[in-house]
Image (cartoon, helix red, strand yellow):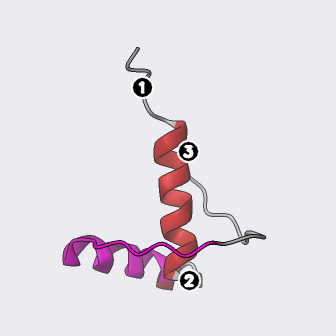
Amino acid sequence: MFKLKADYIEYENKSLRLPKDLIEQVQTLADENNMSFNKVVIQCIEYALGDMEDTN
């Protein structure tokens, strides 16, 4: 199950273009959990990468 974590230690900047509706969904999730948009995006990406099927 996907659970949000509190913090990370080291960051690096990278720009992304995201669909407006996705931004709104992530921002709502961030607001509901009193977290930054960035932290939610990081955790969503980590979850997706950890749950990917092996394509080999």
Q: Which residue is rendered at x = 68% and y = 64% of the image?
A: 5
Side of 43 relative to 14 (left or right): right
C-alpha gap between disc 3 and disc 1? 16 Å
Q: Give me the disc on residue 36.
A: 2
Name the residue at 55% across, 51% down.
46
Kindly state the secondary structure of the residue where label 1 is placed: loop
- Residue 21 is situated, as x and y percent measured from the top left of the image, at 21, 74
Q: Is residue 45 magenta?
A: no
Residue 47 image position (x, y, % from top left): 53, 48
Residue named by callout 3 = 1
**Viewer-closest of 27 and 55:** 55
Packing grade of label 1 (10 A; few <14, some 14-19, many >=20) is few
Q: Is residue 44 above or below residue 23?
A: above
Asked whether residue 23 is drawn in magenta, I would say yes
Mark nearer the N terminus (3 vs 2): 3
Q: Which residues are magenta?
A: 12-30
Amino acid type of the residue tagged 3 in the rendering = Met
Q: Earlier in the sequence, mark 3 or mark 1?
A: 3
Residue farthest along the top direction in this orientation: 56
The location of residue 44, given as percent across then percent down, is 48, 58
Residue annotated with mark 1: 53
In the rendered view of the protein, which quadrant contains the N terminus?
A: top right
Crowding around mark 3 (Cα neighbors within 10 Å: few <14, some 14 to 19, many 20+) is few
Q: Give the amino acid at mark 1.
A: Glu
Mark 3 vs mark 1: give the one in front: 1
Residue type at mark 2: give it. Ser
The quadrant of the image that shows the C terminus is: top left
Instruction: Measure how far apart labels 1 and 2 are at the Cα level.
Output: 29 Å
